[in-house]
Amino acid sequence: MVDEVSATPFDGILELRLGKDVLYTNSSVDFILQGSLVDVASRTDLTAQRLEQLNRVDFSSLPLDKAIKTVKGDGSRQLVVFEDPNCIYCKRLHQSFAEIDNLTVYSLLYPILSPDSKSKSEHVLCAEDPAAAWSAWMVDNKTPAVKTCDNPIDELLQLGLSLGVQGTPALFFEDGSRANGWLPSEQLEQRLQNAAKK
């Protein structure tokens, strides 16, 4: 079902928005094109720009109270990350965090990668100090002690689905922009600076 039809900068090419996806066609729908629409003159990927716009999130609406909070320095910059305990790239992201200062990271556990991801997430969230247990697991590979409790895992899984999170890590910046996958510390720092400007 098409949610919106809008013009593109190119004569005769229309954008079809289906949820958070975009396709292209002409006015008589003789064809449907899936892929990137690139402005050759400016070398701009118009599809990527549009998808970024469609995938923006109201940062203040994210459930930070259900996250594992880690503060570095004065914590003045904020980042929300959907993470799976078995995600190798999430562990690499924690190495990037070690090189960045003045950052508050809110880790929302999103156990989607392995059959034991959910139980590991529960053990972390139910630990006496979830932030310490999460850091020990992600940085030092120390398995969290087996504990169970009421936890928000199912709620976080639903949230991730509603936001279109299909893999981990999924990063959400204060300006509503997002990035999928591991970012080296230099790129992460640049994204944090850009988010602070908006």
Image (spheres, rainbow, N blue to C red):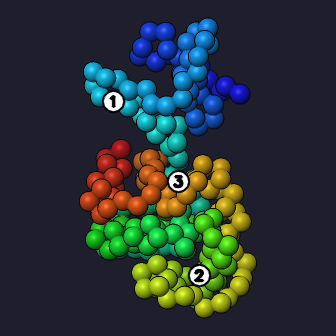
Q: Is residue 160 above or below residue 89?
A: above
Amino acid type, mark 2: Val
User: Is 70 situated left or right of 96 in this image?
Assistant: right
Task: Look at mark 1 in the image and give the residue it sits on.
Answer: 44
Task: Point out which mark residue 60 bears.
Answer: 3
Residue drawn at point x = 62 percent, y = 56 percent? 160
Amino acid type, mark 3: Ser
Q: Position of residue 3 (x, y in %)?
A: 65, 27
Task: Look at mark 2 in the image and give the residue it sits on.
Answer: 124
Estimate the spatial distance between the alpha carbons at disc 3 and disc 1, rounded to whole Å: 30 Å
Q: Position of residue 17 (x, y in %)?
A: 59, 28
Q: Nearer the viewer, residue 172 or 32?
A: 32
Query: The C terminus appears in which quarter of the rendering?
Result: top left
Counting residues from the start of the chain, the first of labels 1 and 2 encountered is 1
Counting residues from the start of the chain, the first of labels 3 and 2 encountered is 3
> Is disc 1 placed on a helix, strand or loop?
strand
Using the rendered view, name the quadrant where residue 73 is placed: bottom left
Q: Position of residue 118 (x, y in %)?
A: 66, 74
Q: Is residue 118 above or below residue 188?
A: below
Q: Position of residue 151 (x, y in %)?
A: 69, 75
